[in-house]
Each structure stands twice: as C-alpha cells, then as structure tokens.
Amino acid sequence: MKNYPAAVKSGLCLLVFAFAYSLSHASQLGKEMNDADDELNVVYANVLSGLPSPELKEQLRVSQRAWVAFKDAEVALHANLYPESKGGLFTRLELTEQRIKQLKSIGERTSGFGYDQGQ
C-alpha cells in the first residue's frame, strides 16, 4: 500500500474484511435457499402423489401456484423495503421453510402417507 496513514490502511482492511464476510454469508444463504428449494420440490411431489383423489391433487396444484405468486410478491416487497437483505433471500428462505412445514402437515393428515422417504 502507498504511504497512507495507519487509520486509512486499517479502515481499508476492515472494509475488505466486511465485504468478504458479506460475500461468504450471502453464499451460505444462497446454499441454504437452494437446499430449501430442493426439499420443497421433493415434499410437494411426495404429498401430491400421496393424495387419494384427482380433485385433491388439483386443489394442491392450485394452492401451490397461489403460494408461489404470494412468495414472489413478498420477496419483491422485502427486497425493496430492505435492499441490504440480498434481494429478499431471508424472506424467501423463511417462506419456503414455512411452506415445507405446511405441505408435510398436509401429507401427514392424508391417509396412508408417511415421511420415511429421506426426510
């Protein structure tokens, strides 16, 4: 580094560290989101296949499409309200985890459906 005062050098080091930490945290959050998306897809498919009637299956499809629209709207809102939240990833992760629980609950209440399949 050039002959900058120690306080400037120290501040730059802290800034670089904070940026690196932020990237690392965002990367971890992105991995958690990908894992949650994968789990959501598996749980949804398992619950859908375990429903006893075509009518219930269609109702779940309609419900899932509505949930996706709601999730996307919430994520957009939170991304604009809190731009430092990495594009609403925290909101997206939270809503996805909640949906997984909802779907598992539906699956558990469906006659003959179990959650032994890797869950």
Image (tube, rainbow, N blue to C red):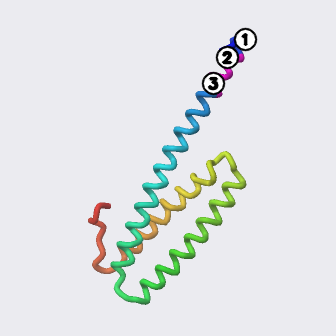
Point out residue 11 in the picture as x, y percentages from the top left corner. Answer: 68, 21
Residue at label 1?
5
Give the residue at the far front of this rendering: 2
- Predominant secondary structure in magenta? helix
Residue 117 drawn above or below residue 8: below
Instruction: Name the element at disc 3.
Output: helix
Distance from Cα at disc 2 to Cα at disc 1: 6 Å
Q: Nearer the viewer, residue 23 or 85?
A: 23
Give the extent of the magenta segment. Answer: 8-15
Marks 3 and 1 in Cβ contact (< 8 Å): no
Marks 2 and 1 in Cβ contact (< 8 Å): yes
Point out residue 71 in the picture as x, y percentages from the top left corner. Answer: 59, 65
Report the residue at 41% width, 71% height from top. 44
Residue at label 2?
9
Q: Nearer the viewer, residue 11 or 108?
A: 11
Name the disc covering residue 14, or none: 3
N-terminal label among 2 and 3:
2
